[in-house]
Image (cartoon, grey):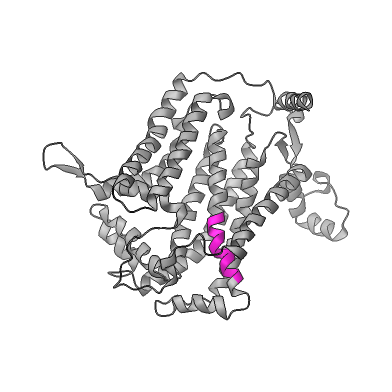
Amino acid sequence: MASGNRTPFKNPVVEWVDSRLPLFTLMNKEYGVFPTPKNFNYFWNFGAIAMFMLVTMIVTGIVLAMNYAAHTAHAFDSVERIMRDVNFGWLIRYIHMNGASFFFIAVYIHIFRGMYYGSYKQPRELLWMLGVLIFLLMMATAFMGYVLPWGQMSYWGATVITNLFSAFPVVGESIVQLLWGGFSVDNPTLNRFFALHYLLPFVIVGVVFLHVWALHVTGSNNPLGIDVKGPQDTLPFHPYYTMKDTFGLVVFIAIYALFIFFMPNQLGHPDNYTPANPLVTPPHIVPEWYFLPYYAMLRAITFDIGIPFTDIVFIPAKLGGVLTMFGSILLWFVLPWLDTHPVRSARFRPQFRIALWVLVAAFILLGVVGGKPPEGIWVILGQIGTLYYFAFFLVILPLLSRKEKALPLPPSIHEAVLQQKKSVGVQA
């Protein structure tokens, strides 16, 4: 790169490197002077927080892999050895174990922010779809990681979830045997899951790179959901948002540390602290908390789908549950085309805002239902939550796209910020 196309750096070492390989110029362009809407709120911190959690999980995972034995006869004991004999092994494991939960917390809030402020709409459709792909890769990685300690819930969770693929006609049994590496969950299964659990985070890094690249091409959305009109609407990313992200990250880490040091096992299941036993089935098999809403949707389909009053069945209950569970996430890929309302932000769409908050309540309800035995009132509540979840995407959003009248939008980000400051000044 010619010297005229970049600004020289004062540090001689940085300048020497950058004049030969302009990495620092690229970083300054994308994360220093990059123009960012000036009205970001703290919901925008969770992208950076999720990035921090991804790095934390990879670093701690590599250290744990150095001491882990991927064998059914030794896996549980190797985890106990990490906890008791490896220097600071207990800390590394607790950071990694609780890190999975906090990674999902950050990503769930990040997804909610995208939905609330319409960050999936034109021109950010591909950015959103890459984000959904990251979430799917996270789910696969987390599921395989949950199997590695080889406790009771690890073994039986792997047995139940992998068996779901047998519901697919023709290819189902072959998929299950491919996942198992045999005819039951055993040592080949554990080896495959360990290899994939180690590999997938690096795949996630690659998709995150594309996700950030797409963000920097289209530019960031903002709480108002309106386009940037000019330089007066933006601020350079550094130092304004680097400082704001740092503050949010410190608060997040403080809560994270609270769990690591004072409640490290709060988010785990007690049954997973006993070795896996294929001969003893736990009374209630449940996945980790961040999978519970989808587990509730899986169990909500308790009926076959076919021609009424005949024996003709098109979709058995098991296959219906599996399709419902996977479909609940695949719907997110087409969200930009389900919600075609011209206004992005829920701030100016009161009906959409109410429907979205009801969706959040239904999702939390499904999380509670997923942790309960599939009987009595819990089955009915799971079916109600599942019905609303799919109705929101397939019925409510298309109707609101055509019928809802939005509130007036501000003329620009800059004027909206000034008006907000004046309102705060008057109140003070």
Toward the front, the furthest residue is 376
Q: Nearer the viewer, residue 275 or 179?
A: 275
Q: Residue at x 41, y 40 (%)?
A: 331
Residue 214: horizontal and vertical position, in percent? 59, 42
**Is 124 part of what is drawn in magenta?**
no
In the drawing, does residue 317 fall left or right of residue 386?
A: left
Q: Which corner quadrant of the image does residue 204 belong to?
A: bottom right
Quarter of the picture containing the C terminus is top right
In the drawing, does residue 403 fall left or right of residue 315?
A: right
Magenta part, dominant SS:
helix
Q: Residue at x 34, y 38 (%)?
A: 384
Q: Which corner quadrant of the image does residue 45 belong to?
A: top right
Residue 221: horizontal and vertical position, in percent? 62, 35
Q: Residue at x 41, y 58 (%)?
A: 287
> Considering only vertical position in the picture, is 142 above or below 329?
below
Residue 213: horizontal and vertical position, in percent? 62, 45
In the drawing, does residue 367 fall left or right of residue 235?
A: left
Q: Is residue 369 visible?
A: yes
Q: Residue at x 33, y 67 (%)?
A: 180
Q: Is residue 22 visible?
A: no
Q: Nearer the viewer, residue 85 or 403?
A: 85
Residue 379: horizontal and vertical position, in percent? 31, 46
Q: Which corner quadrant of the image does residue 234 belong to?
A: top right
Report how many numbered discs are placed on residues in the image.
Answer: 0
Toward the left, the furthest residue is 310
> Considering only vertical position in the picture, is 409 above or below 83?
above
Magenta extent: 91-102
